[in-house]
Image: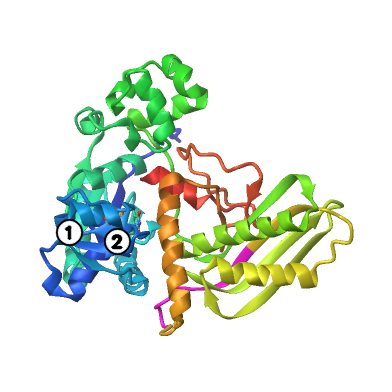
Amino acid sequence: MVAEAPRARPARVILHLDMDAFYAAVEVREDQALAGKPLIIGHRGPRGVVSTCSYEARRFGVRSAMPSLTALRLCPQAVWLPVRMPLYAEASRRIRLILDDASPVVEPLSIDEAFLDLTGVVADLEGGRRVAAALKGRIRAEERLTASVGVAANKFLAKVASDLEKPDGLVVLADDAVPVRLWPLPVERLWGVGPRTAARLRAAGLRTIGDLARTPTAVLAGIVGQDGAAHLGALARGEDDRPVAPHRETKSISEERTYGTDLTDPEEIDRALLARSEGVARELRREGLAARTVHIKVRTGDFTTWTRARTLPSPTDLAEVIVRAARELFAGRIRLERKGVRLLGVGASGLEAPGLGQSRLFPDAAEERARRAARAADSVRERLGDGAITRARLLEAGAGRRAAGGARERPRDTKSARGAARSPRALGRDDR
Ligand code: TTP
Ligand code: MG
């Protein structure tokens, strides 16, 4: 018998797909009269923000998350439309079915983007290119929408590649093209580099990814610390071994926090209930979901843990509604006696996607206004960042989802009920 030679890990083929001007493109599909026009999706009022806009509007400098007033000034002739989430969620679901046909390993990142692992489906990056072209073709034919796709040996490079020739792009980024295509890009394009890190790097004269790749790790460590230097150095060299984590259906969304000092002041407890409810509501909106059931979890100073749940008359994604239920549960169903609150959590389950078989999920005008305001606030927070929110997913118990290159830390005091959910905020932001 001949001993088997140790085998190197096979090269991977990873595909990243991101729809072009997604909400705007869906609206154009619904009304061809909008084609070719500068189109802005968002609330036009004084406190509104732009969700997205057509590429025609981008020529005037309009961008996602921009205050609507700025967009109005930059492009007064633009057509404005409100966000119609059920429509986009439905398109997203159908695109997802197309992606599922191409690979058994699909990781959706947001409503309009996903990673596919094609290792084992195709032999090499050129095989990946063929799959990419076929996917774009099907999405164009069946959905009348365009997507931009990147193919590379890892998630980071695939994501960079999909963005290089947007819209309607298809870029295969081989490792040997990293110096030409990756290195000229600004450091902000790296996962984990936010405005603060970018400013620190800039102050050290490091502006491009190439600047980082050429800087010895020891020098980089002096600027961003040991871990940061290892992480950023690897990405700058085009290395990233995070796996594509296939989608698991979200069963519940929850946020809980443990306090260093037990909470005793009723007002403080109420603020905590509100903050957790807001986090959960925001995450529901981000996922395009609404919840039928609200849970609270309370651990007192003596480690007694209480969980209580209540079903709502109709599903919601609004903090006002969630906190009302959480307050009622807390006031009516928990006996604190004189003990303080050590841990407080709010959760939502019985999740449904609005618009998928549910025709009048949000029939109320006042609620719709509240939702619009909440979404506007979401966009602002998206820019400024916020605390982590955790999700418990089906099949997730025990499956650590922390991605290898994920850089961001979950706040120590926030965790998921099942202990294995990731922080979607960290992924969402780092992935941009
Ligand atoms: P993106 O993929 O970031 O943007 P996009 O698809 O509109 O444009 P492109 O990818 O071609 O650059 O986001 C997908 C959708 O998410 C977008 O159509 C609207 C929504 N969105 C917001 O509502 N607010 C935001 O701040 C961002 C960035 C996106
Ligand atoms: Mg997009």
Identify which residue, 312 or 375, lies in the foreground: 375
What's the amino acid at mark 1? Pro
Q: Is residue 267 left or right of residue 216?
A: right
Q: What label does residue 220 carry, if any?
A: none
Q: What label does residue 102 carry, if any?
A: 2
Identify which residue, 73 or 335, lies in the foreground: 73
Alpha carbon of mark 2 to alpha carbon of mark 1: how far?
42 Å
Point out residue 155 in the picture as x, y percentages from the top left corner: 35, 44
Quadrant of res 375: bottom left
Task: Tell me which numbered mark, 2 or 1, is placed earlier along the sequence.
Answer: 1
Asked if 242 appears above or below 137 in the picture, the reply is: above
Quadrant of res 22: bottom left
Identify which residue, 322 or 74, lies in the foreground: 74
- Residue that lies at the very extreme toward the front in this rendered image: 46
Within-10-Å neighbours for mark 1: few <14, some 14–19, many 20+: few
Q: Is residue 6 visible?
A: no
Point out residue 78 in the picture as x, y percentages from the top left corner: 17, 62
Instruction: Identify the residue at image location x=21%, y=32%.
Output: 177
Instruction: Identify the residue at image location x=78%, y=73%.
Output: 332
Which residue was labeled with disc 1? 76
* Quarter that holds the C terminus: top left
Residue 32 among magenta residues: no
Asked if 306 appears above or below 204 in the picture, the reply is: below
Asked if 195 appears above or below 137 in the picture, the reply is: above
Magenta region: which residues? 347-357
Within-10-Å neighbours for mark 2: few <14, some 14–19, many 20+: some
Instruction: Identify the residue at image location x=29%, y=61%.
Output: 102
Quadrant for ligand 1? bottom left
Disc 2 secondary structure class: helix
Asked if 417 appears above or below 240 in the picture, the reply is: below
Give the colour scheme shown: rainbow
Q: Is residue 66 visible?
A: yes
